[in-house]
Image (cartoon, rainbow, N blue to C red):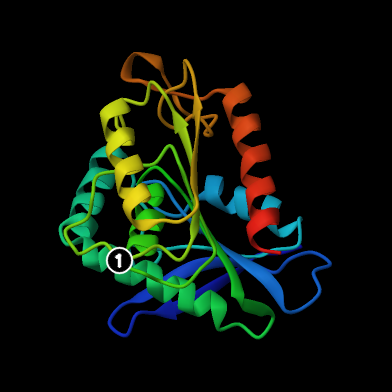
């Protein structure tokens, strides 16, 4: 199973994603977006795309910066993140473009789409749902939960929040505020919180315990089990 460069557009900018067609999937198959962390689309997200494609999904790992841009380090990543989130309608619009591109593929069932995202990608998939876009499953993993600068519409997606309880970027009050938003706008939502777990807990390269960013093999395994079960349930 080989991934391929996949270009798409929002009508203004060009994006360079990574597409994998599900192994042994019967077309039309369900499709899943993967939105990357703030460094941009890289090997970590591509590996997760390969794992999901092996389960039979058509997977598009998203480029929300444009042109396939990747940060060379945390400082540049923060600058790129600030630019794309200065107007959250831009981020949401780029996620809508990715969703439309995935749903428009002949081998994809546009009625069975999901979106998952890591860190900033978690914010991106929440903003996609907040925009009112039509898809079934939304999964932020150690995401960032602050509300957008546009009107939140009714979610069409069911939501599974996979959360490290000690995440310094999403403290308990931020999760509580998100729960209030979901209660108001989403008919089907759930939170799975992992104790003694910080930010970036799915990424083996996260090794900054003092900064609250630390890989947890236990939380990662449990999150993957929850994620795959949720997708199987919602994208049937």
Q: Is residue 176 above or below residue 52?
A: above
Determine which quarter of the picture holds residue 187: bottom left
Would you call the spot at circle 1 few (<14 residues within 10 Å), some (14-19), or many (20 or more)? some
Rendered residue at 19%/63% (across/down): 150
| Kind of element beneath mark 1 | loop
156 w.r.t. 111: above or below: above
Quarter of the image where one finds residue 214:
top left
Residue beneath the point at 68% across and 38% down: 225
Name which residue lies at 38% across and 21% down: 166
**Is residue 113 shown left or right of residue 78?**
right
Considering depth in this image, is 141 or 64 the residue closer to the camera?
Answer: 141
Q: Residue at x 46, y 27 (%)?
A: 206
Question: Can residue 50 be seen in this snapshot?
Answer: no
**Up-down: is 37 above or below 23?**
above
Q: Position of residue 168 (x, y in %)?
A: 30, 25
Q: Is residue 184 left or right of residue 46?
A: left
Q: Position of residue 125 (x, y in %)?
A: 41, 56
The x and y percentages for residue 71 are 33, 49
Judging depth in this view, the residue of 210 and 149 nearest the camera is 149
- In this rendering, the answer to whether 136 lies above or below 160 is below
The total number of labels drawn is 1
- Image quarter hosting the C terminus: bottom right
Q: Residue furthest right?
A: 24
Displayed quadrant of residue 68: bottom left
Q: Quadrant of the N terminus?
A: bottom right
Identify the residue under disc 1. Answer: 153
- Is residue 48 in view from this perspective? yes
């Amino acid at each position: 199973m080989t991934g391929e460069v996949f270009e798409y557009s929002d009508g203004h900018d060009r994006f360079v994603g990574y597409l994998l067609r599900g192994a042994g999937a019967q077309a039309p198959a369900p499709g899943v977006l993967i939105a990357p962390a703030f460094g941009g689309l890289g090997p970590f997200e591509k590996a997760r795309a390969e794992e999901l494609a092996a389960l039979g999904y058509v997977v598009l790992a998203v480029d929300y910066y444009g042109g396939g841009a990747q940060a060379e380090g945390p400082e540049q990543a923060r600058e790129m993140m600030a630019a794309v989130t200065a107007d959250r309608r831009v981020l949401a619009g780029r996620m809508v473009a990715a969703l439309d591109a995935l749903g428009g593929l002949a081998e994809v069932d546009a009625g069975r789409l999901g979106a998952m995202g890591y860190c900033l990608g978690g914010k991106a998939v929440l903003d996609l749902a907040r925009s009112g876009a039509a898809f079934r499953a939304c999964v932020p993993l150690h995401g960032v939960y602050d509300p957008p600068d546009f009107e939140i519409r009714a979610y069409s997606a069911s939501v599974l929040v996979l959360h490290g309880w000690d995440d310094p970027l999403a403290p308990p009050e931020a999760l509580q505020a998100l729960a209030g938003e979901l209660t108001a706008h989403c008919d089907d939502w759930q939170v799975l919180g992992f104790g003694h777990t910080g930010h970036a807990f799915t990424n083996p390269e996260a090794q900054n315990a003092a900064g609250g960013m630390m890989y947890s093999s236990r939380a990662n395994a449990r999150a993957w089990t929850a994620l795959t079960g949720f997708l199987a349930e919602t994208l049937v």
